[in-house]
Image: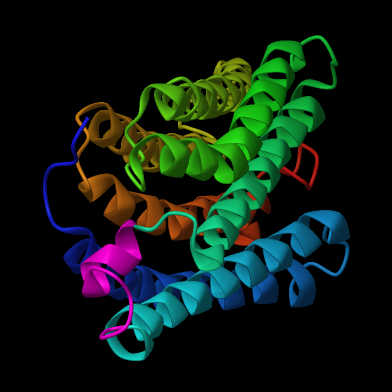
Amino acid sequence: MDSAGVPLDTASIISTALEGILYGFSVLMFMGTMWASIYRKPDANRPIALAAILLLILSTAHLVIDIIRLEHGFVTYRDTFPGGPLGFFQDINQPTFVTKNLIYALQTMIGDGVVIYRCYVVWQSIWVIILPSLLWCGSSACTKVAAILAPYYASQATGGNIYTNQTAQWIPALFVLTLSTNLISSGLLVYRIWSIERRVTRKRVTNGPMMPIVHVLIDAAIMYSAALFTILICFVCANNAQYIMLDMVIITVNVRYEILLNRDHARLLPTLPVSI
């Protein structure tokens, strides 16, 4: 299937620019989150904070690789690479392309894994997270295949076209499983907090302090799910806009995680574990 939409060289410029803008917001949110979780809450969950730092490092590396790809495509190999800049960005066997996909795989695994862990902390039951954990394992496997083997299959079949029969078996499955993991895990978190709040509000007239947490969880889940769904639709339609959305969702993982980690919200939940 031939690709449609914006040319890949144009998509690379747009995606890197938007990724840089979102990265700036992500860094500001990260700084605020770390200040709230470490300095204002000395008893903060250190592994959770470490995961936030790791996600920031991965998103930084992803942005640096995208900048390097722009420099290679439009400057270094502009006149020597077959097909010029467009041919360079169509070559999905480039080490930088494979590396950025591996970074996305790691980010997705960490982000979804932490949300599942929070479900376990809130519910205090291993049975609740069995389905999200199975979906997480499936999405992790599909992510590795899509990041490593899909470029090989595509290059062997069509010389660079990512929209092939082989990749069509793995990449949509990846986004469907990731989307399902996000929706189920976030839904379990929202339902648990809402049910606790409902029991508490029966004894008082006004809403308690936990409803803002529900709103934050819903907003974060909708933001991330909308990005994943858009990528899935673009890939099914063989539209190169998926590359733009994919680079943006890298930062969306960070923003979503930092929203959930923010201790200014978590401190409103004295009756729940601090790592929510």
At horizontal 81% and vertical 9% (from top left) the residue drawn is: 127
Left/right of residue 164 with respect to residue 189 in the rendered view: left
User: 177 or 13: which is nearer to us?
Assistant: 13
Q: Quadrant of residue 42?
A: bottom right
Residue 265 seen in render:
no
User: 55 or 236: which is nearer to us?
Assistant: 236
- The range drawn in magenta is 78-90
At horizontal 71% and vertical 28% (from top left) the residue drawn is: 119
Left/right of residue 85 with respect to residue 122 in the rendered view: left
User: In the rendered image of this protein, does residue 200 appear above or below residue 103?
Assistant: above
Q: Quadrant of residue 163?
A: top left
Q: Where is residue 111 shown, x and y percent of the image?
A: 63, 45
User: 157 or 267: which is nearer to us?
Assistant: 157
Left/right of residue 56 with respect to residue 85 in the rendered view: right
Give the position of the C terminus as an image quadrant: top right
Q: Where is residue 209 shown, x and y percent of the image?
A: 56, 41
Give the position of the N terminus as an image quadrant: top left
User: In the rendered image of this protein, does residue 256 appear above or below residue 40?
Assistant: above
Is residue 83 in the magenta section? yes
Outermost bottom residue: 75
Q: Where is residue 170 shown, x and y percent of the image?
A: 50, 25
Image coloring type: rainbow
Is residue 162 in the magenta section? no
User: In the rendered image of this protein, does residue 39 appear above or below residue 49?
Assistant: below
Residue 134 seen in render:
yes
Q: Where is residue 44 shown, x and y percent of the image?
A: 82, 61
User: In the rendered image of this protein, does residue 195 appear above or below residue 265?
Assistant: above
Outermost left residue: 5
At horizontal 22% and vertical 34% (from top left) the residue drawn is: 238
